[in-house]
């Protein structure tokens, strides 16, 4: 159940400017959802609240890779969960920073479990807005891993990823990040 709710946060990954608790803008309204191209054999996207984390991600042209990954990992229904969730949503540019072939490899059907593990490492089963995040705070993630929050020069980070925007969703909070979070090797 927690994993399902945490996965909802993965839908992630939508946007408004805010990188520091001291200098933030008010969250913007989420744009209405649009259809994202479905990955082959991926489940269709269910209709959801237009202010839901999943709808925010679908409506964001900067999160099409994330949406495709959520579909490939069969986490679509979980992402539409009621929450509350916090999703650290990597942008397309964040995925492009990974070594060549990484994203394509993770989208392969035989890597579905690995992909789901990475995606659920981006979801915390609670709503953490900017006022709830402090330097050194450790968050438990949906995959059982931990992410450490850092505040450097007034800028918020999750592990080594910069939070470049934040948006409040009907089922939680989306923090847009510039780097894909990778769970530590076991």
Image (cartoon, rainbow, N blue to C red):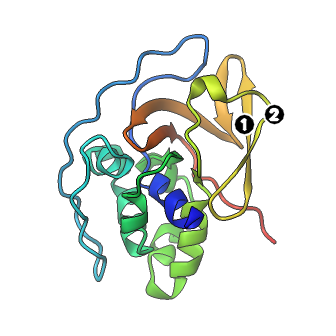
User: Is 85 displayed left or right of 58 in the figure?
Assistant: right
- Element on which disc 2 rests: loop
User: Is 2 displayed left or right of 184 in the figure?
Assistant: left
Marking on residue 138: none
- Element on which disc 1 rests: strand
Quadrant the N terminus occupies = bottom right
Question: How many numbered discs?
Answer: 2
Measuring from the top left, give residue 124's x and y in whole percent: 60, 50
- Residue, x 61% and y 11% (percent of image)? 22
Q: Is residue 31 visible?
A: yes
Q: Which residue is mark 2?
A: 136
Quadrant the C terminus occupies = bottom right
Measuring from the top left, give residue 180's x and y in whole percent: 57, 52
Residue 153 lies in quadrant: top right
Give the answer, above or below, for where 88 lies relative to 21. Answer: below
Residue 183 lies in quadrant: bottom right
- Residue, x 77% and y 28% (percent of image)? 135
Mark 1 or 2, nearer chain start: 2
The answer to which of 164 and 136 lies nearer the viewer is: 136
Cα separation, mark 1 vs mark 2, equals: 5 Å
User: Is 68 displayed left or right of 114 in the figure?
Assistant: left
- Residue, x 48% and y 52% (percent of image)? 9
Measuring from the top left, give residue 33's x and y in whole percent: 21, 47
Q: Is residue 100 visible?
A: no
> Given contact means CB atoms under 8 Å apart, are the residues at marks 1 and 2 in contact?
yes
Marking on residue 149: 1
User: Is 66 displayed left or right of 51 in the figure?
Assistant: right
Measuring from the top left, give residue 107's x and y in whole percent: 44, 75
């Amino acid at each position: 159940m927690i994993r399902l709710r945490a996965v909802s946060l993965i839908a992630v990954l939508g946007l408004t400017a805010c990188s520091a608790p001291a200098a933030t803008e008010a969250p913007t309204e989420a744009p209405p959802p649009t259809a994202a191209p479905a990955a082959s054999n991926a489940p269709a996207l269910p209709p959801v609240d237009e202010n839901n984390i999943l709808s925010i991600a679908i409506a964001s042209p900067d999160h099409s890779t994330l949406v495709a990954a959520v579909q490939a990992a069969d986490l679509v229904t979980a992402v539409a969960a009621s929450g509350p969730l916090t999703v650290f949503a990597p942008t397309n540019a964040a995925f492009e920073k990974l070594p060549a072939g990484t994203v394509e490899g993770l989208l392969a059907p035989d890597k579905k479990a690995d992909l789901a593990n990475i995606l659920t490492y981006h979801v915390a089963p609670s709503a953490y807005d900017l006022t709830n995040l402090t330097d050194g705070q450790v968050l438990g993630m949906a995959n059982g891993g931990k992410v450490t929050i850092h505040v450097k020069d007034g800028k918020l980070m999750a592990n080594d990823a910069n939070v470049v925007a934040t948006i409040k969703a009907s089922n939680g909070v989306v923090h847009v990040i510039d780097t894909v979070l990778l769970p530590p090797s076991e």
